Each structure stands twice: as C-alpha cells, then as structure tokens.
Image: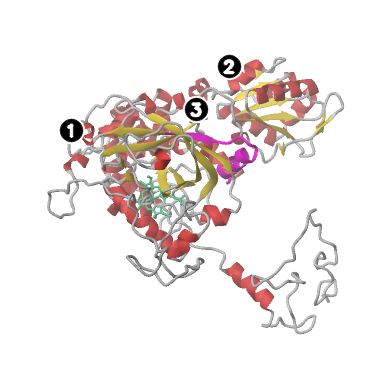
Amino acid sequence: MPKHPPTTRAPRATTGTGGEPHQLAAGSHPPLTTNQGVPVTNNQTSLKAGARGPTLLEDFILREKITHFDHERIPERIVHARGSAAHGVFELHTSLAKYTTAKVLTEVGVKTPVFTRFSTVAGGAGSVDTPRDVRGFAVKFYTPEGNWDLVGNNIPVFFIQDAMKFPDLIHAVKMEPDRGFPQAASAHDTFWDFISLMPESLHMVMWAMSDRTLPRSLRFMEGFGIHSFRLLDAKGRATFVKFHWRPVLGLQSTLWDEAVQLAGADPDAHRRDLWTAIDDGRFPAWDLAVQLFTEKEAEAFPFDHLDPTKLIPEELVPLQVIGRMTLNRNPANHFAENEQVAYCPANLPPGIDFSNDPLLQGRLFSYLDTQLSRLGTPNFDQLPINAPKCPFHTQTRDGHMQTRVPTGRVAYEPSSLQADAPYEAPRGFQSVAAPGEPDAKGRVRPESFADHYSQARQFIHSQNALEQAHIASALVFELSKVETPAVRERLVGHLRVVDADLARRVATGLGLPALPPAARPAMPVQDLPPSPALGLIDKTPPSLQDRCVAVLFSDDSDAKRLAAVDKALRKAGAKVMKLAPRIGGATLSDGTHQPADARLAGSPAAAFDAIALVLSPAAAQQLAQDDTAATFVRQAYAHLKAIGHDDGGLLLVEALHLVADDGVCALDAKAQAFVAAAATRQWDREERIHPLP
Ligand code: HDE
C-alpha cells in the first residue's frame, strides 16, 4: 500500500503530494494554467481510473506537459554548440563617416543594443568551458538600419583558405566517428592527420597551441572578425576593413594544468564567471578597433589579405579604436536567447560589404542554411532575440510558426493596390561595384595564397621565451596523444619549415629518434619582422581589477588581519572569496563569527588568481594533514600564483616544503606586498618548477 493515501485532487494549489504546504516566495502568484490557458488545480498527480488504477488517456494536462517536455531539445549547433551570452550596448566615439554610410559606425554617442555570444568550437552543448579550443566571439548589433552580425573568433586567422574544406576540418576535430571520443579536444589522430596534410593550417595551429586557446575567462579575450570586409561611402567608394575587439581588462590566460583542473572543478567556469561579473555590476567591456586600407595598399602587403590564414600585423596597418561594447545584462532565459540566437555573417547594414575572401563567401551560405535545420523554420528571424529592433517591412510570408499577422491584400512588390505597401528603399544596401575577375570559371586557388609558412614563423618569432615554450609544450602534449607515429612525424616535418628550434623541441619532447624530413614549401618562406602585438603575456597588465582572490580562514583566524587583507584586495579592484573548511564559516580570534563565501573543498585554487592564508597556528597544523588544503596551496603554487600568509599560514606553506619566492609574501598590516604580487602571475617560478621543452 502507498504510504500516503493518494488523492485525485490536491486540496490546494499550495499543497504538495505529501500534504506538506509548499514554501511559496512572497509576492502574488498567478494561477498555473495549461498552454491553452486552462487553470490547473492539481499539478502533482495524473488522472487515474481508481487510486491504484491505470492512467487515463483523457488526462490532457499530463499529455500536454509530457509532450512539451519530450520536444524541449532542438539540434545543437554543429560547431560552437557550447556558448555563453549577454546583452549590452555598443557606443561609437570616433566616426568613420569618411569611409562608410553605416549609421552604427558614424553616429557618435548613440548606444546600439548588442547581444554577444562566446563559444567553444569543438565540444557539444554540455561539454566543459575550458578545453584547449578556439573561442567564438559573435556580436549582433541591433542597428537602426537592420542587424549587423560580426561573427568572429578570439584568433585573427583561420585553419583553412576555402569554405570547401570546412566540413573536413570539423569532421577531423570533432570526436572520431566510430568511437565517439574524444569530446571537446583536438589531441587525437584525426585532427592532427588532417592538419599535417593541410599546411595552410599551420599559422592557425601556432595560435591554437598558444595560451590564447586557454583564456582565463571570456572577459579577458580578444575578438577578431578575421576576414577583410569593405566599408562603402555614399558614392560607393570602398575601403577595406578588419575588425578587432580589445578587452578593456587586458588579456589573461590559464596554464594548461589549471584549465584541466577547472574542467573538473567547475565545468561552467566561463559561463559562471561571465554571469557573475555582470550580476555583480562588474560589466566587461571591449574596445572595437579597425584596420583600414585600400586596395592599392593591399597590393604591397607580402601576403594576400583575402587569404583568411593571414593577418595584417598592427605594425603594418595600425589599429584605430572607434568605440566600446559593454555587456551589462545577463540573458533572461538561456534557451530563448543563447540557444535560439542565430548569427549570420551575411547580416550587414548598408555601408558595410563583403570581400572576396573564399572562406567568408562560403560562410554567407552556411549560417542561414544550418539555422533552418536548427531552428526548424525560416521564421526564426521573428524570435525576439533575432528580430531587428528597427522598423521593418517585408513581403516574406507564412511558413512554420508564423507569429506575425500581416494585413492587407498585397504580399508582393511592385504593387499599386495598397497605400502602405513597402517599396524599394532609395538608400538601401549596396554591393560594391567591383570589377569582375577576368579569369574563366574554375576551381582554382590564387597563387597569392600559396605561402603557408611565413606568418606561422612570424607568429613564433613574435612570442617571448615562455610563450614559445608553452607552444612547444602544447604541441608535445597533443602529438603525444596521437597514436599514429607517421602523423606525429609529418607534423614535425612542417614545424621544421616554420622554425627549426620549435621542431627540435617538439621532436625531443616526443622522443623521436631523429628529425623527420622537412616539408617542402611551395614557395620560399619569408622572414617577416616579429610583431610584438601578437604576444600574450605582455598584454596582461599587472592588475587585480576584476580578478578573484581567495582568502582561507578557519577557527581563531586573526580577525584584524582578515579584515585588512579583505580591504586591501577590494581596494585594488579584486573580488574576494572567503573560504573556510565549512560553509557555515568559523569563529575568529575576537570571538566574532565569520560566514564563508564557499567551502574549501570544492573551491580549487585554479578558480582564483591568487590566494591568502589567514590561519591560526593550530588550524594551519591541522590543515597541513588535510589533503584538500594541501592540494589547494600546492596548486596555487604550481599555477604560479601569489600566496599571501600570516604566521599561521606560513606553517602550512612550510609543511608542504614549497620554496619561498617573491610570490610567497608575508601579509603586512596593509597586505601591500601581497596585493602587488597577486596582480601578476609568478613567471619566474615557472622554469624552476616545470621543466619546459
Ligand atoms: Fe562558423 N559556423 N563557419 N566560423 N561560426 C557556425 O552557424 C562556418 C568560421 C563562428 O554563437 C554555424 O549558427 C563555415 C570562421 C562563430 O551562434 C555554421 C565556415 C569564423 C559561430 C558555421 C566557418 C567562424 C559559428 C554553426 C568556413 C570566425 C557561433 C551554428 C567557411 C570568423 C555563432 C550556426 C553562435 C557558427 C559555418 C568558419 C565563427 C555551421 C562553413 C572563419 C563564432 O553555419
């Protein structure tokens, strides 16, 4: 017999199955209804023929609820499935009126609403946030002349030169089709097999193996439109443009091991970070910068700017900052906004136009096409997140899930029957009047796309010693996961052309008996001048602004010291998380009770930029025996973070036999030394504790 005699009707909407009243939040609660608007009195039990009898088909409330639930999932994006998004505004401060008619780029001071989605590329929607992967950086500007989607990545070049190769690239990087793994990882045979057969991908591979693909958070990443676009003035004159996003907080990345720890500790690390920052009012912002150049100037570049595996160094064409995007509002609903948003590089307002980059040209087809299958109807542009915020009047009609009710007889153009029927706009979208290519039709690749190695070499030579070591280390890691020796060797053969030293380090790291034969480039490799702007560590300003520092305390921790560290860190702009062995907190030296923001176990050091230990000697000795606390401190040290300590905290550090260096600082009255050390990673420690290839 059931424990509680079942009821066919719950006594009141506020009563659960067990007869316990629900705890309702304060406020007015509208009656629950079906999707047809019928009020529902019992949302706990299905309609049955007798208390212990079968459920009746007649129960339309149960059927509607389960049917809807059964169909809640839509196909995830084939790439960039896992993303995190936010609303915000873009404000232009420098007009480009000399080059374009687009209002979003000419109306200074106007706040254009935006919706921005960051994503990983290879993993599924439920994969983790911190794999080694390129990040998508897609911005939808709701401009007064229609939506403009700048659908970019956090790396300024791409793996391939022609859209024809995109399905092959993605099939190679995604989990292998027979075994269904690895998820969200490029460290496997099919990816490196493809790459080693596609030398055009080498430049992007150098970026992908750098710490750029391990961002500390989405707030510390650059974004790039990658392709050249065109700006068009009122006379139809064209100027080429590349778009760049620069994070106001500067760049910051994790170490590989830190990213691995984060994946386990908090698979949502980046999504949570973005959400929390916005929720706290610490709005992340990016400057929008452009590189402008003419066709004639482009002819003098030592590469073809229509080749998306090439970038234009800032030293060649400087960046001009023209405005700022600030993300200031979290999505109200993850599915309706993050999942249903549909970006498309073909969405441009008048005054911006495409270039002939063959990768961009292919993208212009793909996005709408994939969205038809993902969102199920051409009417996905009516979803609130996709609909323009400016007036619009189209003659497109009907289709699945049509939500608009167009009125009148006329659904065509031209027409003479209806006074308010839309007509061609005199100043609408214009395509550049570029001369056609004289060549005959053909599946050809321009000769100017043949240089695959020069910018890969330039990238390596633009990195500092640590950055180069990290790239070598990443290549050794990834290729060590490749089971087929011939693939490893083929890749090292390409590295020999990119940079002899890199090839040697990787070959040694892989334990190759001898260097494999060098690849044979189609044309001589150019020694382009290093571009310091391509580095990463120098773009990480020493700052605690909007960084997160953990302070570990326990029973009898010095109350004054704890307050002082907290104050100093906050003054420097940091977010402080107070950790204790128990979430309930602890009683401090002055007898006051201090609640904890989080429990030590479950808050690994990888989640913080620095840690401070404010502990009584007794608590420190006890914690030294506790593997959770020991791992917390050891990892902070291994990940090159500053560790602040009082006398008790020092006992914990010493018990772990960690060599004291400049990043291990005693907490003075104002915690000055610690605050200064915490603002940067302890790079000097790296070579001492991690043997780099
Ligand atoms: Fe995409 N890409 N892509 N891509 N891409 C998609 O569109 C595609 C490329 C990028 O947050 C898809 O709606 C082709 C470059 C971002 O919703 C799909 C080619 C760049 C996002 C597609 C490329 C990107 C996508 C999958 C080679 C950087 C996520 C879901 C010709 C400039 C947008 C969707 C979001 C998404 C196709 C190459 C960026 C399949 C065919 C280069 C940020 O249409």
Q: Residue at x 47, y 61 (%)?
A: 380
- Going by the image, does 90 lie left or right of 511? right
Q: Nearer the viewer, mark 2 or mark 1?
A: 1
Q: Amino acid at mark 2?
A: Asp
- Going by the image, does 471 lie left or right of 125? left
User: From where the camera sits, is residue 647 visible?
Assistant: yes
CA–CA distance in space, label 1 to label 3: 37 Å
Q: Residues within 10 Å of mark 3 (few under 14, many from 20)?
A: few
90 versus 617 height, above or below: below
Q: Quadrant of residue 536?
A: top left
Q: Secondary structure at mark 2?
A: loop
Quadrant for the N terminus, please: bottom right
672 versus 411 height, above or below: above
Which residue is under mark 2? 662
Identify the image's colour scheme: rainbow, by chain, secondary structure or one colour. Answer: secondary structure
Q: Which residues are magenta?
A: 268-288
Which residue is under mark 3? 690
